[in-house]
C-alpha cells in the first residue's frame, strides 16, 4: 500500500461517521375514525388494519383479504368460490365528502387531469393522504361530469369497483388504476370512452388475466352499490321487467385486456357484443368455477393449476 493511500485510509477511518440529524418524527396521527376506538398499545386485531411500530393502527395495504380473492391459490381452493367485492362505501366519511367536492371542483374548472389521491389531501402530508385514500372503495356517479378530464389517476387505490358512469368521461385518454389490487373487473361502459388510448392496470388481479387466469365469479352476482348502470350497457335501452342480463367479456381497452361486466337489456344485446380478445374465453359468459379458460402464459390450464394448488383435489383425482 502506498503511503498516500495509507494516510488516506487512516484519515477515513478516524473521521467520525457522518450521521445526518435525525428528522423529527411527524406527530403520530390516527388516520381514520373508522376502526372502533383504536388505542395506543392495544393488541386486539382490528380487521383490515394493522399496528405499526408507533403503536397506532393504520389501514392495511390495498389488497384482498387473505384467502378471499386476488390469487389463484385462494380462488382454486375448493369451497372458496370467488365472489365480487361488495364492501360498502362509508358515505358519511369525511373522505367521501372530500372526494365529492373534488369532483365538483374538477368539473367546474374543466380540469384535464384528475388525481384525487395526489391533489386532494395535500395539506396534511402524504401519510394522511394515504389514510383518506383507503376509505374510498367506490367512486360516485358524479364522475360523469368530468367530461374534460383526459387523465384519471387512481394509482394505489382501495377501489373495489369503477362505476359505469366512467363511460361518460368522453375526453378520457389515460386511465391509471395501477396497484389497485381489489379492482378485478371493469364496467363494460368504459368502452364508450372513445379516446381512451393508454392504461396501466395490475394484470394479475384481473379476472381471467393471462398470467394466472383468476377465475370469474359466477353471474348473476350482487354488486357493490353504484355498479348497476341506469340502462343497457350495449344499447342504452331500458331494462325489461326481468332486469339486466349480466355477462363477462374480456376486451382490449386501451393497452390492456380488461374483464368487463355487461348489463344487457336482452339476449339480442348480448349477441351484439364484439368478439372477445384473442387468448381469452371466446364468448360472453357467466363465469363460475367450472368455466374453462385458455392456458396461462406458463402453459397451465386453470383446472391443472387448481389441482396443483389444492392437495385434496390431487389426492382425489
Ligand atoms: Zn340493450
Image (spheres, rainbow, N blue to C red):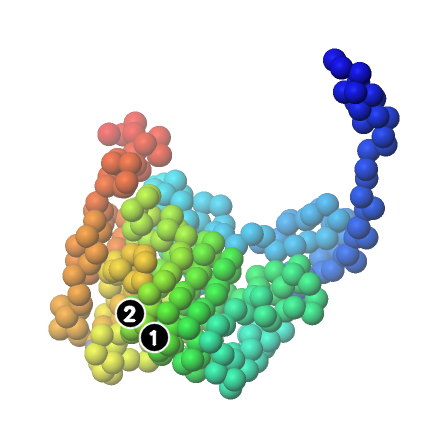
- Residue 160 shown left or right of residue 232 in the figure: right
Q: CA distance from mark 1 to mark 2?
A: 7 Å
Q: Which residue appears at 61% of the width and 60% of the height? A: 130
> Dot 2, crowdedness within 10 Å: few (<14), some or many (≥20)?
some
Note whether ligand 1 is within 8 Å of mark 2: no
Observer-nearest residue: 267 or 61?
61
- Residue 110 shown left or right of residue 101 in the figure: left
- Residue 68's tag is none
Q: Secondary structure at mark 2?
A: helix
User: Badge 1 is on which residue?
Assistant: 167
User: Badge 2 is on which residue?
Assistant: 191
Please provide percent x and percent y for residue 99: 55, 74
- Looking at the rendering, the quadrant in which ligand 1 lies is bottom left
Are discs 1 and 2 less than 8 Å apart at CB?
yes
Please provide percent x and percent y for residue 131: 63, 61
Observer-nearest residue: 82 or 123?
123
Q: How many marks?
A: 2
Residue 79 visible in the shown view: no
Residue 133 visible in the shown view: yes
Observer-nearest residue: 29 or 241?
29
Q: Which residue appears at 43% of the width and 82% of the height? A: 145
Q: Which residue appears at 69% of the width and 63% of the height? A: 125
Q: Secondary structure at mark 1?
A: helix
Position of the N terminus, as image quadrant, is top right
Q: Which residue appears at 33% of the width and 80% of the height? A: 230
Which circle's residue, 1 or 2, is located before the other in the chain?
1
- Residue 240 shown left or right of residue 104 in the figure: left
Amino acid at each position: 500500500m502506498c503511503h498516500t493511500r495509507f494516510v488516506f485510509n487512516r484519515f477515513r477511518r478516524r473521521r467520525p461517521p457522518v450521521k445526518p440529524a435525525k428528522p423529527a418524527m411527524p406527530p403520530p396521527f390516527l388516520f381514520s375514525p373508522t376502526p372502533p376506538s383504536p388505542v395506543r398499545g392495544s393488541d386486539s386485531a382490528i380487521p383490515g388494519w394493522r399496528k405499526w411500530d408507533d403503536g397506532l393502527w393504520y389501514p392495511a395495504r390495498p389488497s384482498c383479504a387473505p384467502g378471499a380473492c386476488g390469487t389463484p391459490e385462494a380462488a382454486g381452493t375448493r369451497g372458496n368460490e370467488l365472489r365480487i367485492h361488495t364492501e360498502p362505501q362509508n358515505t358519511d366519511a369525511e373522505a367521501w365528502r372530500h372526494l365529492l367536492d373534488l369532483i365538483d371542483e374538477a368539473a367546474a374548472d374543466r380540469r384535464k387531469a384528475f388525481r384525487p389521491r395526489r391533489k386532494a389531501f395535500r395539506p396534511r402530508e402524504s401519510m394522511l393522504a394515504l389514510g383518506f385514500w383507503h376509505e374510498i372503495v367506490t367512486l360516485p356517479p358524479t364522475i360523469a361530469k368530468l367530461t374534460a378530464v383526459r387523465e384519471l389517476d387512481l394509482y394505489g387505490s382501495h377501489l373495489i369497483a369503477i362505476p359505469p358512469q366512467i363511460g361518460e368521461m368522453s375526453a378520457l385518454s389515460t386511465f391509471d388504476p395501477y396497484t389497485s389490487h381489489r379492482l378485478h373487473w371493469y364496467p363494460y361502459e368504459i368502452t364508450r370512452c372513445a379516446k381512451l388510448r393508454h392504461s396501466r392496470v395490475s394484470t394479475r388481479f384481473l379476472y381471467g388475466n393471462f398470467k394466472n387466469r383468476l377465475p370469474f365469479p359466477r353471474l348473476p352476482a350482487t354488486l357493490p352499490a353504484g355498479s348497476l348502470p341506469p340502462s343497457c350497457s350495449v344499447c342504452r335501452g331500458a331494462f325489461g321487467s326481468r332486469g339486466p342480463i349480466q355477462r363477462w367479456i374480456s376486451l382490449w381497452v386501451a393497452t390492456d385486456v380488461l374483464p368487463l361486466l355487461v348489463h344487457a337489456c336482452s339476449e339480442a344485446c348480448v349477441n351484439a357484443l364484439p368478439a372477445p380478445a384473442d387468448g381469452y374465453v371466446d364468448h360472453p359468459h357467466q363465469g363460475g368455477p367450472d368455466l374453462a379458460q385458455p392456458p396461462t402464459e406458463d402453459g397451465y390450464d386453470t383446472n391443472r393449476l387448481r389441482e396443483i394448488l389444492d392437495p385434496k383435489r390431487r389426492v382425489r383425482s
